[in-house]
Amino acid sequence: MPDSQPGSAHAVYTALRHRFSDGDYAPGQRLTEAALAADLGVSRTPVREAIGRLLAEGLVIQAARGVAVAALSPVEAAHLFVLRAELESLAAGLAAERQAAGQLAPAAVDALDGAVDKVEEAVRTRDARASARANLTLHRAIAAAAGNPFVEDTLHRVWDRIAVTTVANLDDPHWAGAITDQHRAIVSAIRRGDAQAARSAAKSHIEAAARAYKPAT
């Protein structure tokens, strides 16, 4: 099992992955071993190992005196959104099927509604970073409700690649204002146990996100 002790390469990698998924880094931002080690309070060795994993996953690229946060080209973004639409549609459909079969606890379904409310609250405050985090929390909850760890793991990798520009996109009031109704449609279908409607609503939501997406410049 990976060493999850504080200061281990795995712990550093996990901490950095959370920063990517939370949109803490901007596309093109330079990251150095020394700065990350000081920030995380660890030695440079686990940081170097963690950066190696991030390079292999495409989250960072080689840059002068360190690495830089990878930006998606328009073509790469288009490919990722095609994959994301299919995966999120699958996840929502599986969650609805589990609900119909009585396999989802009522508290889990209620938590989805609560997550939608938190996105709406964050959007109302016009805090793009809080909106991005609340949005990802909801999508993670839907993926978890699907009950398929392989779908969930693949979605985490897709979200991490897209997350670095999610904050900028949720800064668009037109798009930010539209997502609440779309989220409620997905969660409502899951609550009803309507897999087809859940799949359709989730796919439509991600396709709308793709149209609203602003690649880094």
Image: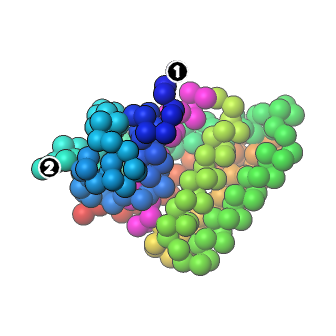
Q: Answer with left or right where residue 12 lies relative to residue 86.
A: left
Residue toward you, 197 or 119: 119
Q: CA distance from mark 2 to mark 1?
A: 32 Å
Secondary structure found at label 1: loop
Secondary structure found at label 2: loop
Q: Residues within 10 Å of mark 2 (few under 14, many from 20)?
A: few
Magenta stretch prevailing secondary structure = helix
Name the residue at 57% across, 42% down.
88
Whether 151 is among the magenta residues is yes
Name the residue at 56% across, 53% down.
136
Q: Amino acid at mark 2?
A: Arg
- Magenta region: 149-169
Q: Is residue 71 visible?
A: no
The residue to which callout 1 is attached is: 1
Q: Position of residue 151 (x, y in %)?
A: 57, 31
Name the residue at 41% across, 67% down.
168
Q: Position of residue 134 (x, y in %)?
A: 60, 60
Most distant residue in the top direction: 1
Label disc, if present, on residue 65 of the rendered structure: 2
Q: Position of residue 121 (x, y in %)?
A: 66, 72
First in sequence: mark 2 vs mark 1:
1
Name the residue at 66% across, 45% down.
142
Coloring applied to the structure: rainbow
Q: Amino acid at mark 1?
A: Met
In the picture shown, does residue 131 fall above or below 40?
A: below
Q: Is residue 53 visible?
A: yes
Most distant residue in the bottom direction: 125
Q: Position of residue 190 (x, y in %)?
A: 76, 45
Q: Residues within 10 Å of mark 1 (few under 14, many from 20)?
A: few
Whether 108 is among the magenta residues is no
Q: Quadrant of the C terminus?
A: bottom left
Residue toward you, 2 or 115: 2
